Image: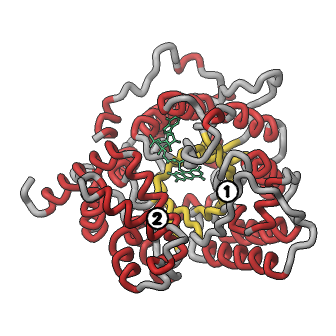
Amino acid sequence: MRLGSMRRWPNGRPGISTTMLRTSQMRNVSALDKRVSSTAEAKIASFDQRLPTKKQPPLAAMPNAALFRSLLFTTIMSTALLKPAMLAMKLIASHNARFLSPAKNPIIKMLLRPTFYSQFAAGENEKEVGKTIQTIKNQGFTGVILGYAREIVLETYGRTPQPVDSPTEAELCDIELWKQGTLRTLRMLSAGDFLAIKYTGAGRVAVDACLSNLPLPPKPIEEALDEVCNEARQRGTRIWIDAEQTHLQPTLDKWVIDLMKRHNRDGNALVYNTIQAYLKSARQNVVNHLKEAQGGDWKLGIKLVRGAYIANEPREKIHDSKQETDANYNEIVEALMKKEFPIAGNHGAFPDMQLFVASHNATTIQKAYSLHSQRIKEKQPTIYVEYGQLMGMADDLSCELLRLRSDDLSSSDEKTRRSAPKAFKCLSWGSTTELVQNLYRRAVENTDAIERTQNMAKALRGEVLRRIGLK
Ligand SMILES: Cc1cc2nc3c(=O)[nH]c(=O)nc-3n(C[C@H](O)[C@H](O)[C@H](O)COP(=O)(O)OP(=O)(O)OC[C@H]3O[C@@H](n4cnc5c(N)ncnc54)[C@H](O)[C@@H]3O)c2cc1C
């Protein structure tokens, strides 16, 4: 498996000498941990006791039920059964086939629950979600990211935005339902976890305000988010705002920057914005975020993803090849970790920020972890970093991160202990019907990453054989 070689990577890079360190840089690193919320850190420490031991392979952290389900699922996704399974899923997700809706057809619900739903979804209510979160934390994950799956499906491409200043009763009801669903989700989380939010979940008003390029969200949406942020702060939970389609994103960026300016106070990155590295404009967008935060009295939070909407986006806005997207992602991570992002024409101090590396790509995670731990060990300036994968995806990579954390934390060297990676799993919750679109997207992502799915199936098979004593 990919990360197995991580330990063999040279952590030191040519041309970097510790003797060249300035005292201010050293102070920079030692201040790093202090800037993270102490509640969250205490919570994290309590989960570290459950990490896999050195003698066990990384997948040993997975409980039997999840291991066997994942093996069954990835095997299906990497064999000839893939085509019929995807066709069925597409039909179910399609709004035209109402008799195939899990809400109307109990047989469909029965088929989805133990397969797609259990693989990718956390549950339908507090009890089920709580159990899933506990299972994940018992494996040693630092925390979870949880989002409510209810989506308002509105065609946004080519849509002519309607006025948003006097929403109807029904539209206000959509916003209220979105807020209540978000608060309910937040209350399922603990200190150190993240709440995932999509602005467009608030419905027509949010979408049209976005398409109209309003500098701030309409009042009912702004007030709802302020309420959510205030409660999240009290609970020690952070919030990330998901990135959506390109034609909505510039406005969403403005809204989230405003939210960060108001809520990321006192050295606390309560809110993170998401930047999509597959966009040719991503580097400039990172620069814009850094400029906004530079010299300010608030802390920037960035979650970096490659981007999920390639099939629907104007192709010219996205890097021409997968290799270019990969290079862009890895370069952004590297420049941020080194605090060397070129902020053209402005030579002030690098702003206070935190980074969440959200990816299933093993090379990306390898590079990020290697560079980050190298910089901590060599007392070079760097930023606070966390890692995450989606539930049911890249479990072998997630478990490898747990193994690295376990190894680092058991070191006698204090700097190695501080470089231990913090790994999260990202979950969606909701009814089978609410999650159908979401499950279909996950299934498509697995199909697109067929090689990774095959690797994961191979790693899971190896672990099953080990557990039954055949390896
Ligand atoms: C925790 C988490 C949260 C996420 N949140 C969001 C979110 O808020 N918004 C969002 O949009 N996505 C989100 N994603 C999905 C993400 O954007 C990617 O689609 C997904 O993770 C696959 O990318 P990867 O980094 O895992 O690596 P890989 O699987 O190695 O990369 C696949 C990605 O590369 C890019 N790509 C593929 N082919 C090409 C090509 N020919 N040319 C250019 N680029 C190409 C696409 O972005 C594709 O998704 C999230 C993912 C995770 C793990």
From the viewer's perspective, tell me whether residue 168 is left or right of residue 64.
Answer: right
Q: Is the C-beta of the residue carrying label 1 under 8 Å from the nearest atom of ligand 1?
A: yes
- Residue 420 in the image: state x and y as whole percent: 45, 45
**How are the colours assigned in the image?**
secondary structure
- Observer-nearest residue: 464 or 408? 464
Q: Is the C-beta of the residue carrying label 2 under 8 Å from the nearest atom of ligand 1?
A: no
- Residue 149 in the image: state x and y as whole percent: 57, 69
Specify the label residue 241 is tagged with.
Answer: 1
- Observer-nearest residue: 246 or 128? 246
From the viewer's perspective, tell me whether residue 69 is left or right of residue 471.
Answer: right
* Residue 31 visible in this rendered orientation of the protein: yes
User: Mark 1 is on which residue type?
Assistant: Ile
Asked which quadrant contains residue 442, the reply is bottom left
- Say which element carries label 1: strand
- Say which element carries label 2: helix
Q: CA distance from mark 2 to mark 1?
A: 20 Å
Q: Provide the residue designation for mark 2.
A: 439
Please tell me whether residue 74 is drawn above or below residue 233 in the rendered image.
above
